[in-house]
Image (spheres, rainbow, N blue to C red):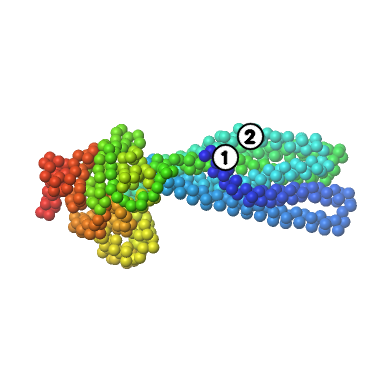
Amino acid sequence: MNDRGLLISYVKANWPYYLLAVTLIIASNVDQAALPRVLGQFTDALKDGTADRSSIVKYSLLLLAIGVSYGVLFGLGQYTVMRLGRKFEFQTRQKLFRKFTDLSEHYFSKQGTGKLLSYVMNDVTSVRESISNGVNQMTNALFLLLSCIVMMALSSIPGSLIAISICPLLVIPFLVVYFGPQIRRRSMNVQEALATMTESAEEQLGGIRVTKTFAAEEIAKRRFAGPVDGVRDAQLRLVRLSSVFQAMLPFLGALSLIASLLVGGYMTIQHTITLGNFVALTLYLRIIMGPLQQIGNVINMMQRSRASLERVNRLLSEVPDVRESEMATPLEKVGEIRFRSMSFAYPNANGPSLRDIDLAIRPGRTLGIVGKTGSGKTTLVKLLLRIYEPPRNTIRIDGQDIRDITLESLRSKLAYVPQDGFLFSTSIRDNIAFSDRDAPLSEIEKGAKQAMIYDNVIQFPEGFDTKLGERGVTLSGGQRQRTSLARGLMKKAPVLILDDSMSAVDAVTESNIIANLKKERKNKTTIIISHRISAVKHADEIIVLDEGRIVQRGTHEQLIMETGGIYASLHRIQEEGLQHAES
């Protein structure tokens, strides 16, 4: 998509409305441009003594008609353009949000939330202003300028006087060529600085509780002061350049007016032109100064919006790392899940995170995955979810390469519960029923009971309608995990993936949750990742990952018998720790 592709496509789609708006504004400008001519004729009538009471009434009514028609035409044109601008803003924000949902996790790992919000807020608003206020003012300025020049040419004002008067205005195109690119570059710097500041603000506010507990308010203030100073400096550089450019346009208009006063005044004294023509000329030039100032404002606005438009188009042109194949088909059912000789490395990583993974998960079975931090456990299931793109033909479900399965159908059949499950700042009920907003309360309560969060929820004054704070701050860590687990269970997906999602609950609660899972997930595929042996020992098969490789596999009983193995070592350490805690 080129720099202006988004804007051009929008204007093409709405060209009849833009044509109507421009026509109305042009008509209003033609109307307004007739005002000096009528005043000039009235002045000559007064000077010649030919004006009487009826002519005074006639000219007054004519001026009133010009004023009323100008107001109606310009008002309708302005409303149409403003409405189109708001429509563009609405549609573009929707496009950006859809783009966010299409982009891969790798993209978001490189971009802060604040920076992404700046696209939606600052950049879209800047472009909207250019196609509402900008189009309105530019159309008004250009056609009012043109109408005034045409009206002057059609009058009895000598062409030589008109040429002398407008000569200073011919410098304007050169100013636009010189200042335009510089304004755009500085506007781009302002938008980037605003994005950095928004990102910093989002981070500082998100970590405000940590800041307070460490009494580090002054440090936070200094960290935020840097981006704020950057915005100020970038904006001042832009303002200095824009001010010089905008000041020069009315200055050229003033030179034009001075030339008309000097030459036109002399020609009036010499009776080369009439007093009415002189009055009309000065009024025309006075009117022209308004459009000149508008043109300066619009050029500044257009250059700023072009910088924003480039940023928005760049985002919309981002290609997701994970893309759906044109030949992709829906996944009808989940059979055997097979990993075959799969190796995977993250972009720009020094080495692979997974190496030669061979694994088969038969339907209805429970798989346990254990291993040290960084051994590749989460990477394995994220590849199954296609959060990251696995190599072709390395992961198959019921014999079908997952890269040939539609993303929606694949992910709809997998329920993933991460360790730090995100909770929305809505009610507990909405969070648990995230996959089915129409679920009856009885089903929500059932999921909450299975996740062992029900007893906690009913103790809140508002029960399941309790509103959670940002990221579920109302709840403790264990309560957040169990609420997230209840959400995963509510999905009733053929495959449930628990990624260390019981790490913040006590041993008794974990034992009860495991018992509920065994009952609820009977004959359903379940994958449990955990650092705790107690969470996976009931699994039909357990694999142990170390540095991206499967180094052990078997049942709990088989693995604890492997002397010197990682699993047996973890089991012994955790058993000793439990005995020590009990004593």
Disc 2 target residue: 175
The three-letter amino acid code for the residue at tag 2 is: Leu
Residue 199, percent across and down? 41, 44
* Label 1 CA crowd tier, 10 Å (few <14, some 14–19, many 20+): many
Dot 2 falls on a residue whose secondary structure is helix
Crowding at dot 2, Cα within 10 Å, few <14 / some 14-19 / many 20+, comes out as some
Asked whether residue 232 is in view, the answer is no
Q: Position of residue 42 (x, y in %)?
A: 83, 51
Instruction: Name the residue carrying label 1.
Output: 303
Alpha carbon separation for disc pair 2 and 1: 14 Å
- Residue at the location (60% across, 46% down)? 12
Camera-nearest label, 2 or 1:
1
Q: With 3 as the anchor, is 538 left or right in this view?
A: left
Identify which residue, 178 or 523, lies in the foreground. Answer: 523
The residue positioned 70% from the left and 39% from the top of the image is 254
Residue 210 position, x and y percent, is 31, 49
Q: What SS does tag 1 mark? A: helix
Left or right of residue 282: residue 89 = left
Q: Amino acid at mark 1?
A: Gln
Q: Quadrant of the C terminus?
A: bottom left
Q: Which residue is painted at 81% across and 47% down in the image?
A: 40
